[in-house]
Amino acid sequence: MRGVLTGRGGVIWWRYHRAARVDDYTITRHTSGYYLRATLVDADATRLQQDPLVFVMPLTYQGNTVTWRWPVLTPIVTEGVLAARLGPVEVSDGALSGSGTATRPTPVVGR
């Protein structure tokens, strides 16, 4: 395993419909890609079976709230926990597009 990002708060979207709210999550980076494990609340089982799904997580970056969007490629939901392989991250507002000397983003709690 190469890296781990943990946090609280986020949303799983299917198109413009909320499929679930995320209580807490862990994203791990392996040589084969990124993987998500998330505890879901207010989940809609039908929407979670649709494609495409996107995991959206808010972060604080240099004092601003930005979002990271991850395509959810292989969702499996068991007893309120989502496990999935993720596609490439999309970052809003240019966060982390600078010189590489920026501070590490911090997950926003309670969203």
Image (cartoon, rainbow, N blue to C red):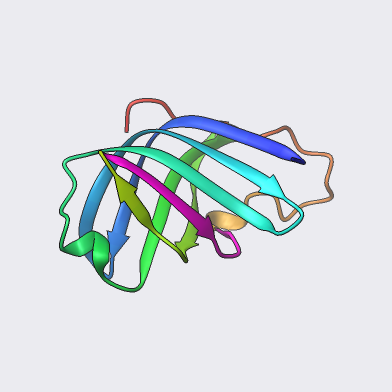
Asked if 80 appears above or below 35 in the picture, the reply is above
Q: Residue at x 74, y 40 (%)?
A: 1
Residue 11 visible to the viewer: yes
The dominant secondary structure in magenta is strand
Query: Where is residue 87, by image quadrant?
Result: bottom right
Q: Is residue 98 left or right of residue 48?
A: right
Residue 86 is one of the magenta-drawn residues: yes
Q: Is residue 3 magenta?
A: no
x%, y% of residue 111?
Answer: 32, 33
Is 105 placed above or below 91 here?
above
Image: magenta residue range: 80-90
Q: Residue furthest bottom?
A: 51
Q: Is residue 6 left or right of residue 77?
A: right
**x and y, in percent, of residue 110 in the image:** 33, 26
Identity of the residue drawn at 25% across and 60% down: 48
**23 sits to left or right of 101:** left
**Left or right: 85 as drawn, with respect to 55:** right
Q: Residue furthest front?
A: 78
Q: Position of residue 12 (x, y in %)?
A: 32, 53
Residue at the top extreme? 109
Q: Position of residue 63 (x, y in %)?
A: 56, 31
- 33 or 90: nearer the viewer: 33
The residue under the point 15% across, 63% down is 46
Query: Would you identify the image quadrant in which residue 15 lies?
Result: bottom left
Q: Who's the residue at 54% across and 31% down the image?
A: 6
